[in-house]
């Protein structure tokens, strides 16, 4: 549904001193089969959430959800 690589919101500084600019390809799945699994050790937990009941998010995640709402409204690919 979209692609994001804005340095204002995608630049992250980690506690070890690493600083990176992410790029994110955002996909919207309408069907899911299988189970969630953390295979690389980077995540502590994985889960699905209703958009109306999300857990606390990083500030950099909020633009993604706003663009998802725009995608749902317009049906158009979001580049931001």
Image (cartoon, rainbow, N blue to C red):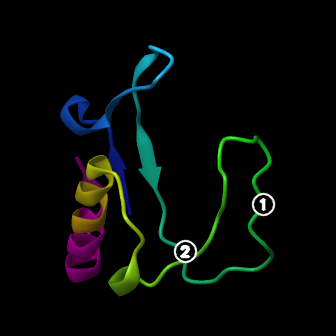
Number of residue marks: 2
Q: Residue furthest front?
A: 15
Q: Is residue 78 magenta?
A: yes
**Helix, strand or loop under label 2:** loop
Residue at figure coordinates x 19%, y 33% from the top left = 8
**Helix, strand or loop under label 1:** loop
Q: Which residue is identified by label 1?
A: 37
Q: Is residue 61 magenta?
A: no
Is 9 rendered above or below residue 17?
A: below
> Residue 65: percent from the left, percent from the top?
29, 66
> Residue 28: percent from the left, percent from the top?
48, 70
Tell me which corner region of the image, top left, top right, bottom left or bottom right, holds residue 66.
bottom left
Judge by depth and name the residue closer to the eye, 11 or 45: 45
> Residue 71: percent from the left, percent from the top?
27, 72
Whether residue 27 sits left or right of residue 64 in the image: it is: right
Whether residue 57 sits left or right of residue 14 in the image: it is: left
Determine the CA span between mark 2 and mark 1: 17 Å
Q: Which residue is identified by label 2?
A: 29
């Amino acid at each position: 549904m979209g692609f994001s690589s804005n340095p204002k919101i995608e630049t992250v500084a980690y506690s070890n001193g690493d600083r990176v600019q992410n790029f994110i390809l955002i996909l919207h799945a309408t069907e899911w089969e299988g189970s969630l699994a953390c295979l690389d050790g980077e995540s502590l937990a994985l889960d699905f959430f209703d958009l109306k009941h999300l857990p606390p998010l990083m500030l950099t995640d909020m633009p993604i959800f706003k663009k998802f709402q725009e995608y749902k409204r317009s049906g158009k690919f979001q580049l931001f």
